[in-house]
Structures are given as C-alpha cells and as structure tokens.
Amino acid sequence: MADAGSRVSGGRAASGSPSDAHYNRIKDDLVRGSYPPGTVLLETVLGERYGVSRTPVREALGRLAQDGFIDRGSRGFVVRRRSPEEILAIYEARISLESTAAGLAAERRTPFDLSRLDHLAEQRRGAPESADRATLTAMNEDWHRALRAAARNDIVSGFLDRLDSLLAIYRPATATPVDADRTVVEHDAILDAVHASDGARAQETMTTHLTRMRDLRIQGLARELS
C-alpha cells in the first residue's frame, strides 16, 4: 500500500527523491517523540543531525507543516502542541472513513482477503502477554490496513494512512491488558461481519471500536497534560 502522503499530496512521496527521504526521516522522529511539543526545529541543527544541507531540510519542514505535523511560527518551524480537540477532529474523519471501508470490505472482500485477515487476527490473538505496546500496535495496524485493502478504494485508504500518522503522536503511554483484550474482541466482531458480507454490521462494529479508541487517546493525553 502506498504511503498516505503520496496519495494525499499529489504523489510527492512516491517519487523516492532525497526530499521525500528527509521528509520521512523527520516525520518518523516526530511520531516517535524525538522532538517534544514546542521544540523549535532549526534547519542547521537538523541538517547536522541528518547529514544534509539546509535546502532539503527546509523543503521537508515545509511539507510537514502543510501536512499538519508542525507549525510555522515567528521563530521558524515548531512542533505542534496537541489537544483533545484535535483528537476529536481526527477521529471524526477516521470513524467516518474507516467505517465506510469496513462496509466496503464486507461487500468486496475476496477469499485471499479473508485468509489474510484471519491470519493477522490469529497472530494478534496469539501474541504473548510479554509483548510490548509497539509490537501489539504494529499487529493492530497491519490488520486495519489489510481490511482497508479489502475495501478496494485507494482514496479512502490514502486518507486513512495520513490520519494514522497524525494519530500516532497521540498513542497512550500505556495500555491495560483489558484494553488489549477488548481490541481483539472488537476486531473479531468486525471480521465476523466481513465474513458474513454484512456491510451494515461491519460499519457499526467498526464505529464502536474506533469510538472507544478515540476515548482512550483523549484520556491518555489528559493524563499527560495534568
């Protein structure tokens, strides 16, 4: 599946240019939390860190500002301070788009799609209790991407990929075993609807799942800000 930024931004990230590489490197560091909110991103400092000149860094920062990861302030580019309101706005879009994708997947999925989704769901169910959050998150994301692929709508998938990147910054620092177990149960409910070719039920169960995830992210951010 192509990178969300390439679809949403007119195919820029698909070109594989040096500018794209620097964009992705800085974005990945932002998602990992390498630059806390409020950090001023200086072209000279970033150039030294990544071993490049200021020009590609400047281009990458401009794109990151356009895509909502950073702000352009009076002192230059600044890492955005996130808010519960922004989580709500992102999830408002994600719930609408991903519930639509789930409904389409129920109608358009192939035997291969079902086999892939079943395999990924089984991997997630079989994850050891010692698995860390990053591993579980990657498994969940793989399952969601497979479901989107089954919907066969690249536009919807592209926008959802970009929303994923924005939401990654909001991942709660911890997740309880109960939360993790509920995610497995909710994924299974969605998958049952897809197996049954029940688009309406797939949409409804996806909406329920993502609404809970939205609330968890808001709670996590509230704890960080308190």
Image (spheres, rainbow, N blue to C red):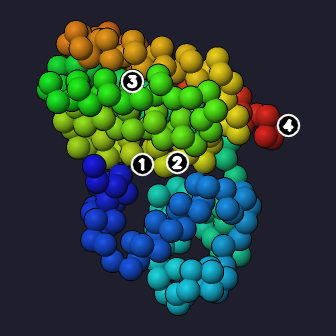
In the depicted structure, whether residue 217 falls above or below residue 157: above
x, y (%) of residue 117? Answer: 30, 27
Task: Report which quarter residue 129 is drawn in.
Answer: top right
CA gap between label 2 and label 1 equals: 7 Å
Q: What residue type is labelled 4?
A: Ser
Tell me which label, 3 or 2, sits earlier in the chain. Answer: 3
- Mark 4 or mark 1, earlier in chain: 1
Q: Position of residue 144 (x, y in %)?
A: 38, 33
How many residues crowd mark 2 within 10 Å: few (<14), some (14–19), many (20+)?
Answer: some
Q: Of discs 3 and 1, which sits in the foreground?
A: 3
Tell me: residue 55, above or below residue 174. below
Tag 3 residue: 122
Q: What element carries label 1?
A: helix
Q: Nearer the viewer, mark 3 or mark 4?
A: 3
Which residue, given by chain and number where applicable, does mark 4 sit on?
226
The amino acid sitting under disc 3 is: Glu
Find out whether the residues at labels 2 and 1 contact each other: C-beta distance under 8 Å: yes
Q: Name the residue under label 2.
A: 166
Other residues around mark 4 within 10 Å, as few (<14) / some (14–19) / many (≥20): few
Mark 4 touches mark 1? (CB < 8 Å): no
Secondary structure found at label 3: helix
The picture quadrant where one finds residue 180 is: top right
Mark 3 crowd level (few <14, some 14–19, many ≥20, 10 Å Cα): few
